[in-house]
Amino acid sequence: MADTSDGRPRPAEARPHWAIRSLTATRGASARGWRWWARNWDRLVAALQDEEPVGLGAPATPSGPLIEQRTAPRQIVVPAQGYVYSFHIRATFAWSSTVSLRAEVLTWYADYFMPQAVQRLTRLAADAARELAPHRAADLEIHLQQALATQGPWCYQRGDLEVSCTPDVAVRLDEPIRRAVQPQIDRLVSLECRLEEHLQQARYAEELSRRWVVILDEHLAVAGGDPELATARQHLLSRQREAIRWIDELLAQRPLS
């Protein structure tokens, strides 16, 4: 602050009028902006539930409902019969909604309801697993898939919005059980390969015999009953019957799937 000629401090100069008007206008705009956000916030959130209109040059909106594929953050582990070993379940969920949602909104709802869906699937798997021996992972997987197909999509609601998910499962053996059954599975695979090889040979022998019988029938019709051709025909018919019997025996030995 400057001094006057007599040594007394000079009063501060008055602030310019344009500066006061600018500050007042800025404060008023800020207040109006805050009131606008307060009035329109709910409307903006609701607008996020609808897809943006497709403008010029924008990619076309995909047909059909939007689907969010999510994998459970960790495998679901449920005890097998005897409560010593477990089954390990890898679960995926296909989330969708009957109303049009933006991708980020559907993602938010999938994250929100995922713990409930995982918990429901865990209970369903645990109820079935406690009656199954620990090496019967395939039976548990089939049971869960049939149960999920019967139930249909799982629906969850928050406010007025409802989303649904369709679970899918894959069941794996407990690692100690897998190591224990590995030698047996290897032997079964080897036997199955050998059986399939013999089955192909038997089918080939039956097909070859059948074709030769057709050829000999044609020659016998022309030759008028040649004894050698008739003997060869009977021999081939016998081989064909043997091949058919071989095929039936091999199919009877094949393990049931």
Image: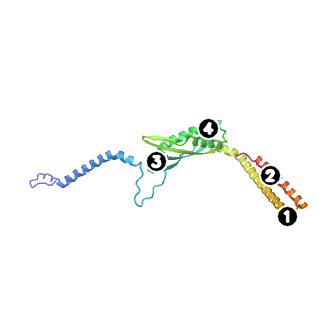
Of circles 4 and 1, the one toward us is 1
Mark 3 and mark 2 lie on one chain; the one further toward the N terminus is 3
Q: Nearer the viewer, residue 153 or 133?
A: 153
Q: Amino acid at mark 4?
A: Ala
Q: Amino acid at mark 2?
A: Ile
Mark 4 and mark 3 lie on one chain; the one further toward the N terminus is 3
Instruction: Give the spatial CA distance, label 3 vs label 1.
Output: 79 Å
Q: Amino acid at mark 3?
A: Leu
Which disc number belongs to residue 222?
A: 1
Which disc number belongs to residue 106?
A: 3
Q: Position of residue 182 (x, y in %)?
A: 70, 47
Which disc number belongs to residue 128?
A: 4
Secondary structure type for disc 1: helix
Q: Position of residue 255 (x, y in %)?
A: 73, 46
Badge 1: residue crowd in 10 Å (few <14, some 14–19, many ≥20)? few
Q: Position of residue 46 (x, y in %)?
A: 39, 46
Q: Report the side of 179 relative to 4 (left or right).
A: right
Secondary structure type for disc 4: helix
Q: Quadrant of residue 136?
A: top right
- Count of numbered labels shown in the rendering: 4
Instruction: Give the spatial CA distance, label 3 vs label 2.
Output: 60 Å
Image color mode: rainbow
Instruction: Give the spatial CA distance, label 2 vs label 1.
Output: 29 Å
Q: Are marks 4 and 3 in contact (CB under 8 Å)?
A: no
Badge 4: residue crowd in 10 Å (few <14, some 14–19, many ≥20)? some
Q: Nearer the viewer, residue 176 or 119?
A: 119
Instruction: Give the spatial CA distance, label 4 vs label 2.
Output: 43 Å
Mark 2 and mark 1 lie on one chain; the one further toward the N terminus is 1
